[in-house]
Image: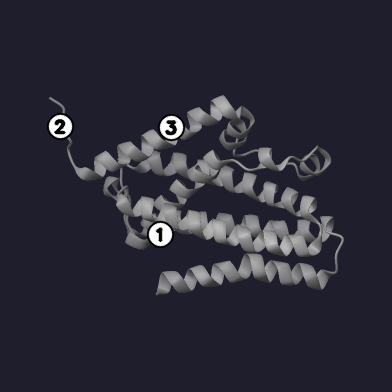
């Protein structure tokens, strides 16, 4: 007779099954995107992205978006609880993942409105595509890390280090995108600075205030 040892194990199993389902679906529907995830140590070649034909429907992937949301939910749960065990995979993970989705949709709406003003849609979307690929690689790495450590568990210091390193990695990705804005966008620098403040700094400021609240 099958027995559930504890509720935390059950949630961990659900998260693991959902993650594997997403990866299997990517294998069937978008194998190139899956390879980009799995080979996370290979940098995205900026020149290649800007030279090849760009199609928006190929650049955006709902599956990888959900995957990143789940990883974000787990990382934020670790950061908030300052600990990491099987019990960390609970309902809060889905709550934080849904919050990430809502925030991302709102941010994308604002960002798209600004992009229309510059009339440089394709160049912007190429840069956003590069940023997204790098975030997906980071999410896959941390997904493997936290799933491999789930049965071991981590104390306060180790948990904070993992959660903070993820935040730093995402921050570095956004920081590296700044040079692409100035390199590939033929607009006045002051407009680029305003765009960075609106799309990069302002959302982060709002999130920090919401978390503090």
Disc 3 to disc 2: CB gap under 8 Å: no
User: Residue 155 in the image: x percent, y percent?
Assistant: 31, 55
* Residue bearing mark 1: 160
Q: Earlier in the sequence, mark 3 or mark 2?
A: 2
> Can you tell which of label 1 and label 3 is closer to the viewer?
3
Give the residue at mark 2: 3
Image mark for residue 136: none
The residue at 68%/59% (across/down) is 112
Would you call the spot at circle 1 few (<14 residues within 10 Å), some (14-19), or many (20 or more)? many
Q: Residue at x 49, y 54 (%)?
A: 101
Image coordinates for residue 167, horizontal then vertical, percent:
52, 58
Q: Nearer the viewer, residue 80 or 7?
A: 7
Residue 196 lies in what quarter of the image?
bottom right
Q: Is residue 75 visible?
A: no
Please, what secondary structure does the residue beneath circle 3 have? helix
**Residue 208 versus residue 41 in the image, above or below:** below
Pick the residue in front: 58 or 185: 58
**Residue under numbered circle 3:** 20
* Residue contact at pointers 2 and 1, CB within 8 angstroms: no
**For the residue labelled by badge 1, is the local secondary structure a helix, a strand or a loop?**
helix
Q: Position of residue 102 (x, y in %)?
A: 49, 57
Residue 35 visible in image? yes
Tell which circle, 1 or 3, labels the residue nearer the N-terminal end.
Answer: 3
Of circles 2 and 1, the one toward us is 2
* Residue 41: x %, y % from top left: 61, 39
Horizontally, residue 66 falls left or right of residue 13, namely right
Q: Dots 1 and 3: beta carbons under 8 Å?
A: no
């Amino acid at each position: 007779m099958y027995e559930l040892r504890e509720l935390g194990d059950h949630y961990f199993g659900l998260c693991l099954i959902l993650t594997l389902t997403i990866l299997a679906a990517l294998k069937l529907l978008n194998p190139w995107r899956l390879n980009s995830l799995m080979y996370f140590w290979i940098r995205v070649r900026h020149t290649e992205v800007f030279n090849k034909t760009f199609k928006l429907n190929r650049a955006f992937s709902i599956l990888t978006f959900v995957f990143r949301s789940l990883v974000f939910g787990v990382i934020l749960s670790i950061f908030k609880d300052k600990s990491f065990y099987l019990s960390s995979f609970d309902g809060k993970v889905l709550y934080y993942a849904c919050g990430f989705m809502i925030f991302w949709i709102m941010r994308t709406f604002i960002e798209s409105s600004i992009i229309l003003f510059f009339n440089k849609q394709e160049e912007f979307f190429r840069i956003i595509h590069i940023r997204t690929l790098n975030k997906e690689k980071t999410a896959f790495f941390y997904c493997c890390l936290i799933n491999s450590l789930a049965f071991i568990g981590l104390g306060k210091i180790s948990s904070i280090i993992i959660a903070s390193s993820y935040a730093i990695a995402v921050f570095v990705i956004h920081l590296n995108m700044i040079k692409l804005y100035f390199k590939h966008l033929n607009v006045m620098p002051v407009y680029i600075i305003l765009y960075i403040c609106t799309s990069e700094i302002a959302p982060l400021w709002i999130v920090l205030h919401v978390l503090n609240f």
